[in-house]
Image (cartoon, rainbow, N blue to C red):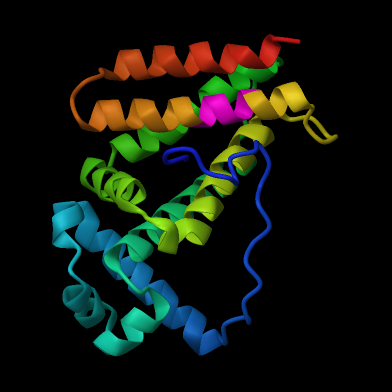
């Protein structure tokens, strides 16, 4: 999912930041934090995610939480990345069946939209965090953009690298998906309009 224009929105996944790997204990602590934030957002949206409550629910010290995630925006962008990664795994296990790339991409993004539709307050929290993200969250936003682009590339289903025209189409499709989601969350677009927009954007893949 793309916010406003991101330098990593090139239609191919960005290289992850080089960071030391987490220990098993640290990874489990991070998972607890993400689960706590996800549960709070699903119940009450963006405003319900308060760092002190997240720390208490995850059973970590508030200072520890801030070492993992410097702000609520960092935290909710990480939640969005986790949601996209889970969706990627699901779609890889159950890929779209259409023979042509455009319908496969449209089907994949429609399924992604319906997954978010089931938890509208969580979707609202994640999208607001993406919109509020400044340069300090740039690396995390780039990872979300890369995951969204990879979701589209997986749906295309080709073995080789994408062409320049495909990369351009992926960027436009990614931006369309994000804009359609924002429009739906704000009540400016119906589910049918979102679906129509996704299918229209996916047809860009048929262009030479």
**Place of residue 163 in the rendered image (x, y in percent of width and height, measured from the top left):** 79, 27
**The C terminus is located in which quarter?**
top right
The residue at 23%/32% (across/down) is: 185
Residue 99 is left or right of residue 191, and the answer is right
**Place of residue 175 in the rendered image (x, y in percent of width and height, measured from the top left):** 47, 30
Q: Quadrant of residue 194?
A: top left
The residue at 66%/17% (across/down) is: 205
Does residue 43 appear in the picture of this structure? no
The residue at 26%/19% (across/down) is: 189
Observer-nearest residue: 192 or 52?
Answer: 52
Residue 168 is left or right of residue 208, and the answer is left
Q: Is residue 104 magenta?
A: no
Observer-nearest residue: 163 or 119?
Answer: 163
**Place of residue 118 in the rendered image (x, y in percent of width and height, measured from the top left):** 29, 38
Magenta-highlighted residues? 169-174
Q: Quadrant of residue 178?
A: top left
Residue 106 is left or right of residue 60, and the answer is right
Task: In the rendered view, tell whether residue 136 sits above or below residue 173.
Answer: below
Figure label count? 0
Magenta stretch, main secondary structure class: helix
User: Most extreme residue toward the right, as rendered?
Assistant: 160
Does residue 129 appear in the picture of this structure? yes
**Place of residue 197 in the rendered image (x, y in percent of width and height, measured from the top left):** 42, 15
Residue 104 is left or right of residue 25, and the answer is right
Task: In the rendered view, tell whether residue 205 sits above or below residue 173.
Answer: above
The residue at 17%/69% (across/down) is: 50
Task: In the rendered view, tell whether residue 19 sits above or below residue 178.
Answer: below
């Amino acid at each position: 999912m793309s916010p406003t224009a991101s330098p990593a929105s090139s239609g191919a996944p960005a290289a992850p930041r080089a960071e030391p790997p987490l220990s098993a204990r640290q990874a489990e602590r991070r998972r607890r934090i993400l689960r706590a934030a996800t549960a709070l957002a699903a119940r009450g949206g963006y405003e319900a995610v308060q760092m002190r409550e997240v720390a208490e629910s995850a059973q970590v010290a508030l200072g520890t939480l801030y070492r993992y995630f410097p702000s609520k925006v960092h935290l909710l962008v990480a939640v969005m990345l986790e949601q996209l990664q889970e969706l990627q795994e699901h779609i890889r296990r159950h890929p779209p069946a259409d023979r042509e790339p455009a319908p496969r991409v449209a089907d994949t993004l429609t399924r992604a939209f319906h997954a978010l539709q089931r938890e509208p307050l969580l979707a609202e929290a994640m999208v607001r965090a993406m919109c509020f993200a400044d340069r300090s969250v740039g690396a995390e936003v780039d990872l979300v953009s890369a995951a969204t682009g990879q979701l589209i590339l997986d749906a295309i289903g080709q073995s080789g690298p994408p062409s320049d025209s495909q990369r351009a189409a992926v960027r436009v499709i990614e931006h369309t998906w994000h804009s359609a989601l924002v429009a739906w969350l704000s009540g400016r677009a119906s589910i049918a309009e979102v679906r129509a927009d996704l299918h229209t954007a996916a047809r860009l893949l048929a262009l030479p």
